[in-house]
Image (cartoon, grey):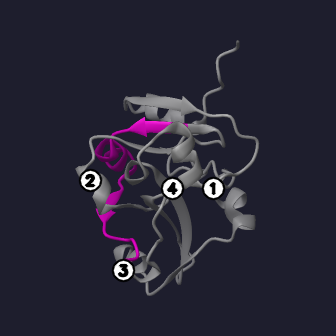
Amino acid sequence: MAKEAKTNAMRFLEKNKIEYTEKAYECDEFIDGVHVAEKLGQPLDETFKTLVAVGKTKAYYCFLIPVDKELDLKKAAKSVGEKSVELLHVRDLTAVTGYVRGGCTPIGMKKQFPTVIHSAAEELPEFYISGGRIGLQIHLSPKALADAIRGKFCDIIAE
């Protein structure tokens, strides 16, 4: 069988010498992160989804949170110095990021947006994020990711 094609995310990680492992799964269309984690036997609190939001200033931001949690828009806005943020509409996702829903990752986008990773990840040695396409997860160090993309850790989930 032919080797899987590298995604922009994988190329970015290799270029920046960041260790990662990939985990592929069968999937033809979007399934939510909870189902992906369950399908792969990954802990929900170590599997993060990437949400893209737009601020009042029209700037874009990425927020990484555990797949079974909800983003607190007020905390998210505060973490990036905005008055408010709202999630990007799914129809605009590919145009803004270059990724599709279910394959969006904070690395290898058309442009690197300011990224906030929920603070719980800071304590994890490794976590799972999308690998840049539906059917692919990447397992890597949250701190290495944050360093490479100049991301930061903040409490951004709803209680």
Q: Secondary structure at mark 1?
A: helix
Q: Residue at x 71, y 40 (%)?
A: 27
From the image, state whether disc 2 or disc 3 is nearer to you. Answer: 2
Q: Amino acid at mark 3?
A: Lys
CA distance for labels 4 and 3 = 20 Å
Residue 122 numbered tag? 2
How many residues crowd mark 1 within 10 Å: few (<14), some (14–19), many (20+)? many
What stretch of residues is rendered in magenta?
A: 137-159
Counting residues from the N terminus, which is met first, the one under dot 1 or under dot 3?
3
Q: Secondary structure at mark 2?
A: helix
Residue 49 numbered tag? 4
Counting residues from the N terminus, which is met first, the one under dot 4 or under dot 3?
4
Residue 97 numbered tag? 1
How many residues crowd mark 2 within 10 Å: few (<14), some (14–19), many (20+)? some
Asked if one can make out residue 108 in the rendered structure from this viewpoint, the answer is no
How many residues crowd mark 4 within 10 Å: few (<14), some (14–19), many (20+)? many
